[in-house]
Image (cartoon, rainbow, N blue to C red):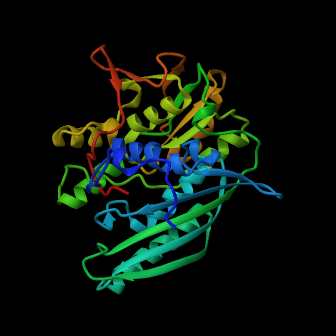
Amino acid sequence: MIPTCPIPLDRYPIVTLAHGDGGRLTHQLVQGMFQRVFTDRELLRAHDGAVLETPWSRIAFTTDSFVVRPLFFPGGDIGRLAIHGTVNDLAMCGARPRHLSVGFILEEGLAMETLWRIVCSMGEAAEEAGVAIVTGDTKVVERGKGDGVYVNTTGIGSLEHELEIHPATVQRDDVVLLSGDPGRHGIAVLAAREGLAFENEIESDVAPLAAPVLGLLDAGIDVHCLRDVTRGGVATALVEIAETAKLAIAISEVAISSDPAVAGAAEVLGLDPLYLASEGRFLAFIPAAQVGDALAVLARHDVSRGARTIGRVAATPAGEVSLDTTLGTTRVLDRLAGATLPRIC
């Protein structure tokens, strides 16, 4: 028997999916379709993972799939990206990453040397992040149906505190921290994909983020929300948080400034650095009184040594993110429309 769905399909506005569709379509799918049928509270929180209460402890649980093209790019590859991307989603829940599963979808004809490089990279990344790969699955699809290899990773982490860390716990007057310069991953993947050469090679910032996050928690920082800056960049991540929290966020363009090489490449290519993906940067929402202590903690870790304050949370206009530009104007930001760079993760 076919179950009755709460949304008649003839009323749903999306009838086809196109390769490269971006943040707005994903948001529409999540809110308009997935969250109407899958109604668990943890999913409705719209965070990077779920926090589950077990009889023994609190754990974080997340999953992600990786379809990046090309498979190898300056600073990383699909294997390293898959491990650290999932580790970072656990860290954004405030969890210590513990265990991962790995699922491979391999295309017929994939060179074993290519797969071996990816597997070795994943092993190195797991060791770097302090996680164990404990189970997995492998499937092979017909030639021309899988683009070489796709990877799915699922992660479990332990929570060693009682904080609630997700967008709905953001508070008025919270300060927004960004852990470093954004956009490196997006430019690195684009350059590898299109064969572009810049004066200075730009490497992806893909890296594990659990160490600085756990450092904040160990220092007693009252972290309200964390979000890694991936597809859609800083702007989309902030809009998602503002809409869920039903609060306003005001940020400064000067404070966010990208690395000069990234900013220059983005300008040449006509891209907005605010919407470029990172894979080793995160946003943190904390009380204003703890900013100094938080920045001191982040400065102890290489991956977050460039942390800075970029903005503040206000009550109104609810759900809006505004940018104070270098020209002295104010610009309202929206989530990424379309896909500036498809197949980025």
Give above or below for 317 relative to 302.
above
Place of residue 218 in the rendered image (x, y in percent of width and height, measured from the top left): 72, 43
One can see residue 277 in this view: no
One can see residue 230 in this view: yes
**Which residue is located at x 46 percent, y 63 percent?**
82
Question: Residue lying furthest front in this view?
Answer: 1
Query: Taking 148 as reference, is 173 left or right?
Result: right
Residue in front for this viewpoint, 241 or 118 = 241
**Which residue is located at x 35 percent, y 51 percent?**
185
Place of residue 316 in the rendered image (x, y in percent of width and height, measured from the top left): 50, 16
Residue in front for this viewpoint, 205 or 168 = 168
* Corner quadrant of residue 196: bottom left
Question: Residue lying furthest right in this view?
Answer: 55
Residue in front for this viewpoint, 248 or 268 = 248
Give above or below for 169 relative to 19.
above
Give above or below for 215 relative to 192.
above
* Corner quadrant of residue 110: bottom left
Question: Residue lying furthest top in this view?
Answer: 328
**Which residue is located at x 53 percent, y 60 percent?**
63
**What quarter of the picture does the C terminus occupy?**
bottom left
Query: Taking 175 as reference, is 23 left or right?
Result: left
**Which residue is located at x 36 percent, y 86 percent?**
112
Query: Taking 33 as reference, is 289 left or right?
Result: right
Place of residue 199 in the rendered image (x, y in percent of width and height, measured from the top left): 19, 49
Place of residue 123 in the rendered image (x, y in percent of width and height, measured from the top left): 52, 73
Query: Taking 118 as reference, is 135 left or right?
Result: right
How many tags in the picture? 0
